[in-house]
Amino acid sequence: MERIAIMRQLRVELGQRSYNIHIQAGILNEVGLMSRDFTSVCKVMLVSNPTVYNLYGQQTMEALHTAGFEPVLALMPDGEEYKNLDEAARVLDTAVESHLERSSLIFALGGGVVGDLAGFAAAIFQRGIDFVQIPTTLLAQVDSSVGGKVAVNHALGKNLLGAFHQPRAVFIDPQSLNTLEERDFKSGLGEAVKYGIVYDADFFAFLEENAAKIIKKEEECIEELIYHSCRIKSLIVAADEKENGLRMILNLGHTFGHAVETLGGYGFYRHGEAVVMGTMAASYLALEMGLLTEAELHRITALYHALGLKTVFPSLPSAEVYQAMLGDKKVKAEKIRLVLPRGIGSFYIADDVNKEQVIRAIQTAQTLK
Ligand SMILES: NC(=O)c1ccc[n+]([C@@H]2O[C@H](COP(=O)([O-])OP(=O)(O)OC[C@H]3O[C@@H](n4cnc5c(N)ncnc54)[C@H](O)[C@@H]3O)[C@@H](O)[C@H]2O)c1
Ligand SMILES: [Zn+2]
């Protein structure tokens, strides 16, 4: 029996910068017409990479043409290692050469890499033009397409060059996940679990109860997972758009994780994989500090395993990991600020952890599975 595609809609409440997130199987065919709700411009740019464009480019281009858009195409190479200033400059060259205007739109079709880079280009082209996110990986659908953080990497650190620039709309087509590689699907799950750990115990329980269905990619379950992830992220972003407080909690596992990504070489570990490893280190630290019980730590590990995620921290020298963590832009005056789980569904921001504690947590995460 064919399932009727349900349209789910969320709104990110940010005053004049508010926008909708639309989640619906098949919505890729509607992105043009639906964008007519907020623009009458003709000239637009579609940013993607060859992998995604070969799969969904034609369909998206048709959807744009149908609605009277005249899209120019800018393709960046596929990979985290290309999320840099050089590639952003190339995309911007296309924008300039094809005479994009202040009122033009950029459509980002792809995973978090394309979304972050295209959004960054939109943020600086003529001091900022509108852009639309069409995320095609699970990670981008549950996290990176929402919230307006756009950035490119620097050789010395992840996302060091960036801006806050909210999209005008987010169109999520869960069907696009059918072509995603298993490893990328899992990486997205790794990122989604954080919402449960630091903010929403019910969501954590939902993931526990449905882990088997989730790894089988049962459609309804995946749509629910995407919906709740976007719902939670929208609430957090609406409360703290520029990350002066609450939004920080979404960095759970990220300071450790970014060090892993930087030391591993961009692209070696998937972002979500690094976040899982980093969250384990943060969880051991939380255990040591009495913020987490053994039983709660076990629930976190068990959930990751049920979702098919590897929890063991890579065997990089812990002193180097620590050093790379100091290079992370979230570090304030040589002190590492870390988001830690406090039980399941809550958080603690630690400003006062010392080097020994961090190194011990890394080493524990390297030895325990
Ligand atoms: N801006 C934010 O708030 C935020 C949040 C989390 C992560 N991120 C960033 O997101 C990036 C990671 O994103 P990602 O995991 O989506 O990686 P990605 O964009 O590299 O995509 C992973 C791979 O999947 C391919 N792909 C994309 N869609 C596909 C599809 N439907 N079918 C088949 N293949 C497809 C891509 O070409 C790529 O090879 C990192 O750079 C990370 O820093 C940003
Ligand atoms: Zn992340």
Image (spheres, rainbow, N blue to C red):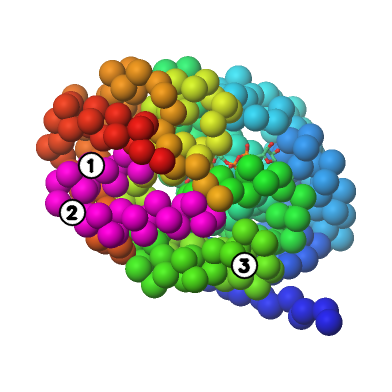
Q: Give the quarter the ligand 1 occupies.
A: top right
Quarter of the image for residue 6 reads: bottom right
Q: Label 1 sits on what residue type?
A: Leu
Q: Quadrant of the C terminus?
A: top left
Please provide the residue range marked out in magenta: 280-307
Q: Where does the image place residue 309, in percent across and percent down from the top left? A: 52, 47
What residue is at 49 percent from the left and 71 percent from the top?
209
Q: Where does the image place residue 264, in percent across and percent down from the top left? A: 49, 22
Q: Which residue is mark 2?
A: 291
Q: Point out which mark residue 285 bears.
A: 1
Whether 57 is drawn above or below 19: the answer is above
Q: Label 3 sits on what residue type?
A: Lys
Q: Which residue is mark 3?
A: 213
Q: Point out which mark residue 157 bears.
A: none
Reading the chain from its start, which is encountered first: label 1 or label 3? 3
- Label 3 SS: helix
For the residue carrying disc 1, how many other residues have a C-alpha within 10 Å: few (<14), some (14-19), or many (20+)? Answer: many
Q: Is residue 257 magenta?
A: no
Q: Nearer the viewer, residue 223 or 24?
A: 223
What residue is at 29 percent from the left and 34 percent from the top?
364
Q: Is mark 3 within 8 Å of ligand 1?
A: no
Whether 80 is drawn above or below 24: the answer is above
Q: Is mark 1 within 8 Å of ligand 2?
A: no
What residue is at 44 percent from the left and 20 percent from the top?
263
Q: Label 2 sits on what residue type?
A: Leu
Left or right, residue 248 beside residue 266: left
